[in-house]
Each structure stands twice: as C-alpha cells, then as structure tokens.
Image: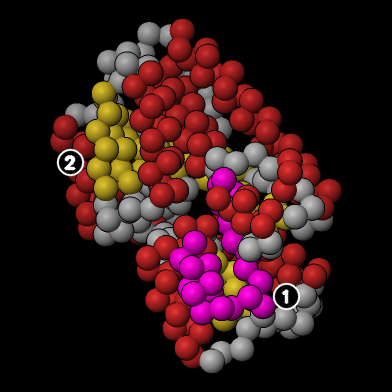
C-alpha cells in the first residue's frame, strides 16, 4: 500500500472521529433515555475491556441501562449470552465476537427476535451464516498486518520472520497473518512468516510461547506480535533471557506501546484505538434508535507508528 494512500486513510479516520463527536452532541439532545442494551465481551483482553468501558460510559451518559456479559472466548457461551440478553428484553446488543461462526448464529437469533445486533472488531460472514448485522465497526486488521509487512520489506527484505498470533477463530488473527504475508509477497521478498503459536491476545499466555520460541533454537530476526498486551509478555521473556538483537513489531498504539517505540524496544505498531471503535459503534446504535441512516459496515484505517512519527501519535 502506497504511503500517499495510508496518509489519506489516516485523515479519513480523523474525520470519522470528529464526525462521531459531533453526532454524539446531537444525540444527547434527543430523548432516548430508558433504553436497555447488552454488551457481550469476547474474553479477558485489556483491549476489549477498554472498548466496552467507553461503550458503557457513553450509554450511561444517555441514561441507558447496561448489562455486560463475557463469553470467555467460548463460542457456546457467546450464543448463550446473546440468548440471555434477548430473554431479558434488551433494546439492542453489541458484541465483540469470540468466533465468526458463533457470531453468525448469535446474529440470526437476534434477527429472529427482532433485536438489533451490532458487532465491534470482528463480525460474522453474513452470506455463509445467514445472520445479518445491524452495524459493524472495526479496524482493518488485514491492514495492520500489511503495514507491518511493508515495513519489513522496506527495511529488512532478507529477514527471517516469525509471528505470535492472537486468538484463532475470531477472524482478526487470521486477517493479521494474511496481511503481513501478502505485503511480503507483493514486494517479492521471498519471506514466509512462520507462526510459532497463539498467545490468545494475553500477556500471560504469550510468555510460554516466547519461551518456547527461544528454547527451540529457531533462527529469526523479527517477531510480529499481534497485539501489545502479548508484546509485554514477549518483552519480559526477552529481557529475562538477555535477548537484545531481535526486532519486535506489533499492533495497538496504546500509551505503553508508544513508549516502547520511543525507548527502542519496539520498532513499529499499527494503531487500532478501541475508544474510537466504541464511539463509532455507539453512534450507529444511536442513529438506529433515532431512525436515521448510518454507514452499516464501517472499517477504520490509520497509519503505522514508527520512530519517525511517534511524537505525533495519538494514544488510546
């Protein structure tokens, strides 16, 4: 992807954020109090917690009653959580899905019950599952991988690259993997990224993956860690074992990640602030309740953060 296009996409994301703030001010003037909504979280990830913290705060500012449930990365529990919320008579549901297939079943249940269902981050494939989403907001996780792949192609075209992946089945980890490999292929590097395991988006689970990687004796120059929470675990292991010659690339752009770039611990991170995702999804829900049109499937793009532009980065 060309730099010019990335800059354009970054500007688009900023404009979308400005629009979200403006429409929220409009929505606050409408009498939408008394709504009951349900939020279904995928699992115990700090990214998801931050996202729904913002979502819940916006809803309560509107005078809404909020029920938050956690699927603990279980597709079966996700379906059960959605069913429970339908039974409770909520006016709308927002879901961070644990699995694209269970998401489709959950969406179909909500459709049959006449309850609007919004997805944030991942979403079901409507054609294959039959479940229709009322609205979706997410970053291009494919683009997060692609930007990191382009950075490798530009700076280390002969590197040996491994990845520590997120939770499988949601579609996001798979999109990261496809993006980074496609970028490397597009630049004819000949590099094939080797996955060394999943840390399930959690630092505690990324630690043994990183330990096993070092113990295996596998040669690598760069490790792509699919989020900064897992990166914290990888950095801990590398520091404990005195590893200083490996390059780390990641995704998120939170405060901690920006400081790592400034300190030279991480080379790049693809920002996907959950606060922006939450705000835009909430606006979809507000517009739905007001009977106003809105962009149903919204994908947000931002530019890669590196040492060259880190001083201008906006954290979570």
Label 1 to label 2: alpha-carbon separation: 45 Å
Pick the quarter of the image with the N terminus. Answer: bottom right
Q: How is the image coloured?
A: secondary structure
Element type where label 1 sits in the image: helix
Residue 244 got which mark?
Answer: none
- Residue found at x 36% / y 30%: 56
Count residues near mark 1 (Cα–Cα under 10 Å), then give few for <14, some for 14-19, many for 20+: some
Q: Indicate the position of residue 29 as horizontal and vertical percent values.
A: 46, 7
Residue placed under numbered mark 2 in the picture? 84
Precedes in sequence: disc 1 or disc 2: 2
The residues colored magenta run 232-255
**Residue 26 vertical position relative to residue 114 in the rendered view, above or below:** above
Q: Indicate the position of residue 27 as horizontal and vertical percent values.
A: 47, 15
Residue placed under numbered mark 1 in the picture? 185
**Residue 16 vertical position relative to residue 180 in the rendered view, above or below:** above
Residue 243 in which image quadrant: bottom right
- Residue found at x 41% / y 25%: 58
Element type where label 2 sits in the image: helix
Closest to the observer: 74 or 153?
153
Q: Is residue 196 left or right of residue 161?
A: left
- Residue found at x 17% / y 41%: 84
Residue 142 in which image quadrant: bottom right
* Residue 29 lies within the magenta run: no
Closest to the observer: 83 or 125?
83
Q: Indicate the position of residue 133 as horizontal and vertical percent values.
A: 41, 42
Closest to the observer: 117 or 162?
162
């Amino acid at each position: 992807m060309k730099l010019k296009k990335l800059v354009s996409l970054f500007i688009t994301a900023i404009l979308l954020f400005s629009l979200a703030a403006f429409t929220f001010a409009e929505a606050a003037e409408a009498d939408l109090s008394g709504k009951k909504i349900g939020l279904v979280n995928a699992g115990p990830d700090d990214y998801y917690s931050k996202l729904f913290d913002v979502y819940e705060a916006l809803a309560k500012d509107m005078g809404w009653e909020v029920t938050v449930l956690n699927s603990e990365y279980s597709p079966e529990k996700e379906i059960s959580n959605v069913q429970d919320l339908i039974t409770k008579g909520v006016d709308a549901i927002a879901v961070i899905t644990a699995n694209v297939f269970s998401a489709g079943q959950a969406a179909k249940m909500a459709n049959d019950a006449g309850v609007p269902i919004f997805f944030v981050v991942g979403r079901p494939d409507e054609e294959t599952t039959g479940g229709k989403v009322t609205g979706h907001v997410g970053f291009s996780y494919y683009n997060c991988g692609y930007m990191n792949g382009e950075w490798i192609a530009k700076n280390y075209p002969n590197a040996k690259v491994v990845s520590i992946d997120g939770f499988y089945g949601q579609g996001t980890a798979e999109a990261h993997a496809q993006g980074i490999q496609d970028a490397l292929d597009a630049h004819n590097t000949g590099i094939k990224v080797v996955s060394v395991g999943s840390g399930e988006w959690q630092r505690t689970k990324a630690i043994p993956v990183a330990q096993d990687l070092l113990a295996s004796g596998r040669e690598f120059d760069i490790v792509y860690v699919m989020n900064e929470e897992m990166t914290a675990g990888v950095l801990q292991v590398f520091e404990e074992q005195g590893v200083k010659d490996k390059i780390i690339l990641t995704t998120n752009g939170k405060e901690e990640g920006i400081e790592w770039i400034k300190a030279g611990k991480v080379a790049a991170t693809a920002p996907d602030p959950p606060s922006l995702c939450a705000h835009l999804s909430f606006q979809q829900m507000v517009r739905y309740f007001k009977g106003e049109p809105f962009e149903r499937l919204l994908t947000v793009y931002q530019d890669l953060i590196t040492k060259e532009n880190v001083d201008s980065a906006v954290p979570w």
